Image (cartoon, rainbow, N blue to C red):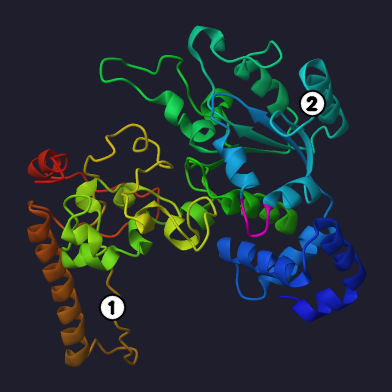
Amino acid sequence: MTDSNEIFDTERSSLVELERRLDLPRREFLKLCSAIAATLGLPVGAEAAVAKAVETAPRPAVIWLHFQECTGCTETLLRAEHPTLEKLILDVISLEYHETLMAAAGKQAEDARLAAMRKYKGRYLLVVEGAVPTHDNGIYCKVGGKTPQQMLAECAADAAGIIAIGSCASWGGMPSTISPLATSSPTGSTGIATVLGKPVVTIPGCPPNPYNFLSTVVHLLTFKRLPDVDAKGRPLFAYGRLIHENCERRAHFDAGRFALEFGDEGHRKGYCLYKLGCKGPETYNNCPTIGFGDAGEVNWPVGCGHPCIGCSEQGVGFQTGIYELSELRYIHPPVGYPSIHEKQGKGASLGAMAIVAAVGGGAAGAGAMLARNLGRNARADAQPHGPDEAAKPPAPDQAAASRHDPRE
């Protein structure tokens, strides 16, 4: 990795110009680059490469479409504070079309979009916010006289990369909510990958943390490619682990300490919110690490005392009851086994085997204790290694118990 001082010394004049253009003190700019590198999970020293990319790389042209949504994803970007992201959005990328932010309207706005598509053919980044209605040929949403399906096909054809921001664009989100008496949502809303029939990078959340989007764009600037994703198109740096694994209340879960009602003693003491319907055990996101919506001081719903509703997880957010118990992927605390160093040809020593047995027994005991505290018969499944590893099917009695009233 190139030394940070070397980059900043050799490129000082252009870096100073960037700071002036962004109206950011150098210290704040370098903090931002460090935060992006940390969000991406890059090694120490990578902030130098991030800073150089933001400083020198050509600004990517961005065409930003809006379909069925509340504009919350745009709002969370504009309201970010570390630093204010409108400076970065308007100066680091070249925002060619965005209905909410652009001054033009009507024909002038659509002419600007078409002109940008011609000028940057094969080089622009397409960002989509909002779900796509599919019932009745998509007539429930139109922009410039075109349905989202028509507009999406037109813009995606020559895009260098496609990003779905928010749960609505990623998999349907709130507009895809289905009534218990219906078989589909009223407008047949779905994510853009389903409509396009090809992979896209998805950044789900309602809304997603602005740094997950920003880090995805900066990854493109730094490494000339979009980040690694899982089977659902989610960047692994942000959606590679369950919320439950990094939750600040996880120790209470492992110990069997739960809040049973809002305002009760357990709730006031900061106990686990699982029995109030927290969806952390089945939702992949980095909220415990970077917070929710850049609200300041790494704040997020669970930190405020409300259960996670699984807003970023397809099949969980807006599809199950907010206070309905979530499915557990595993119920025992993660266990790290000690290394066993022996010469080749020799087996493990009795002492080492005793340590392994003790640790394994402790894990089994913790699982049994937790099962008892949860008030159900449950088996401690193995910890999943990523979002694509399916959970083991629960036993019939566990499946029946998994949806009981959380206050019981």
Packing grade of label 1 (10 A; few <14, some 14-19, many >=20) is few
Q: Nearer the viewer, mark 2 or mark 1?
A: 2
Q: Residue furthest top?
A: 136
Give the spatial CA distance, label 2 vs label 1. 57 Å
Q: Amino acid at mark 1?
A: Tyr
Residue named by callout 2: 113
Horizontal arrangement in the rendering, residue 60 relative to residue 340 (left or right): right
Q: In which image quadrant can residue 372 be found?
A: bottom left
Assign the magenta stretch its main secondary structure.
loop
x, y percentage for residue 163? 62, 39
- Tell me, yes or no, if residue 150 can be seen here: yes
Q: Secondary structure at mark 2?
A: helix
Residue named by callout 1: 337
Range covered by the magenta-colored residues: 80-84
Magenta span has 82? yes
Q: Earlier in the sequence, mark 2 or mark 1?
A: 2
